[in-house]
Image: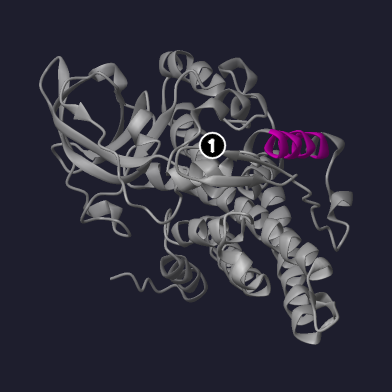
């Protein structure tokens, strides 16, 4: 163990000894490419994220130096076709990358999945060829960082009520409004922004940093996702070139299609956070001696660990099957909602139980558990709250929407 000191905090750098649980031998369901992609991401997280993430979480700062590495492991648009700078991987590979990144930190995974599913995905799916060639290769390498503007101060779970709007001024659009809780906003080069036209129809526009009237104030004083940059998007008579309108899909279904991709990635990512908490608690239970024996030899601690590995295994099976359906183009929005809701709730429960197992040590930055727990309090809310996803499943099985 080595230590280093910055101007505010003392950090004890422990080696990353993480070992991924695979209780049902699910590696047998993966291809060699899947395992290579996952293992590459895992090795990168151990080398580049684990040694620094506690410091950056304490400082409430995103470690920008990891952007190049995120790109190199396929963290930006891994399923985007090669001709646009992506890796051309399948959906299970995407999920495995998100799992490994979130094992390191949910905030880092947020940066990756926003770039992939909420910026690159809509440009790829809803943009034209000129837009794809202009933006996607630079987003894939991390030369450009993007963000996604949907949530507004008064419209979160009801994004269709948005008031951000644009008007046709002849040779350009005039954009006005505001978005909040936007990951990557403070340093993003571009924003995919959803706004209503003069008829009330929702469209996506690509807004570039430097456009007059476009500002991105940072959100401070967060207890969660502290190693992720969060901010607002403010549009004050922003002139957006007409060629920046995404032409191939409009309506609320357009941004919701992006959220399907992002929620799918979250379902995998939450497993990574849960695995890290479980692995930490398991190792601690084997080393911590109380009443002359390891605490892992007691019934209550074994109960916690047995329930953790059971729930992780169930979540692994759920996401693997969902990945197969995504690859086949058969996964539904409701199926994705079920996985996102279940897996984040599972991860939160495991984080809380693991924190208890570590006693007072569980709240310190020497271990990752409390950071994961705080991060997951955001993950359980963003891109569809826990309750909203429950209602999506309820509507799917009954046929009755309970939102209104």
Image position of 86 with respect to 7: above or below: above
The answer to if 45 sits in the magenta stretch is yes
Image quadrant containing the N terminus: top right
> Where does the image place residue 118, in percent across and percent down from the top left?
45, 38
- Residue at image point 76% right, 36% down: 43
Left or right: residue 242 compared with residue 346: left
Q: Residue at x 39, y 29 (%)?
A: 248
What residue sits 21% from the left and 27% below the top? 214
Asked whether 116 falls inside the magenta stretch, the response is: no
In the shown orientation, is residue 390 left or right of residue 329? left
Q: To which residue does mark 1 refer?
A: 112
Image coordinates for residue 116, horizontal then vertical, percent: 52, 34
**Magenta highlight range:** 35-47
Could you tell me if residue 196 is visible in this image? Answer: yes
**Figure check: 29 above or below 127:** below
Query: 101 and 116: which one is in front?
Result: 101
Categorize mark 1 by other alpha carbons within 10 Å: few (<14), some (14-19), many (20+). many
């Amino acid at each position: 163990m080595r230590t280093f000191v910055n101007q505010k905090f003392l950090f004890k750098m422990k080696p990353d000894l993480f070992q991924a649980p695979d209780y049902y031998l699910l590696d047998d369901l993966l291809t060699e490419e899947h395992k290579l992609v996952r293992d590459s991401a895992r090795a990168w997280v151990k080398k580049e994220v684990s040694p620094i993430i506690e410091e950056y979480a304490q400082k409430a700062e995103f470690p920008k130096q990891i952007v190049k590495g995120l790109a190199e492991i396929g963290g930006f648009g891994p399923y985007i076709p090669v001709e646009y700078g992506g890796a051309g991987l399948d959906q299970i590979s995407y999920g495995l990358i998100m799992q490994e990144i979130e094992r390191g930190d949910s905030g880092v995974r947020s940066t990756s999945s926003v770039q992939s599913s909420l910026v690159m995905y809509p440009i790829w799916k809803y943009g034209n060829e000129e837009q794809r060639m202009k933006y996607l290769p630079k987003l894939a390498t991390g030369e450009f960082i993007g963000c996604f503007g949907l949530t507004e101060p008064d419209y979160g779970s009801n994004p269709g009520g948005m008031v951000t709007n644009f008007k046709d001024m002849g040779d350009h659009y005039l954009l006005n409004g505001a978005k909040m809780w936007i990951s990557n906003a403070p340093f993003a080069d571009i924003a995919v922004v959803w706004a209503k036209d003069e008829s009330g129809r929702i469209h996506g526009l690509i807004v570039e940093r430097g456009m007059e009237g476009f500002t991105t104030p940072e959100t401070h004083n967060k207890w969660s996702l502290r190693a992720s940059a969060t901010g607002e998007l403010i549009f004050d008579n922003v002139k957006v070139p007409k060629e920046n309108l995404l032409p191939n899909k409009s309506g609320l279904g357009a941004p919701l299609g992006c959220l399907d991709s992002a929620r799918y990635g979250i379902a995998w990512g939450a497993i990574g956070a849960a695995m890290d908490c479980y692995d930490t608690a398991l190792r601690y239970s084997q080393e911590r001696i109380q009443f002359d024996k390891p605490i892992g030899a007691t019934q209550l601690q074994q109960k916690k660990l047995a329930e953790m590995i059971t729930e992780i295994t169930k979540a692994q099976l759920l996401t693997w099957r969902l990945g197969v359906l995504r690859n086949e183009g058969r996964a539904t929005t409701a199926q994705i909602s079920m996985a996102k809701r279940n897996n984040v709730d599972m991860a939160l429960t495991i984080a809380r139980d693991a924190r208890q197992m570590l006693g007072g040590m569980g709240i310190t930055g020497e271990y990752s558990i409390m950071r994961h727990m705080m991060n997951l309090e955001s993950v359980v809310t963003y891109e569809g709250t826990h309750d909203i996803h429950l209602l999506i499943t309820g509507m799917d099985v009954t046929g009755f929407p309970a939102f209104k």
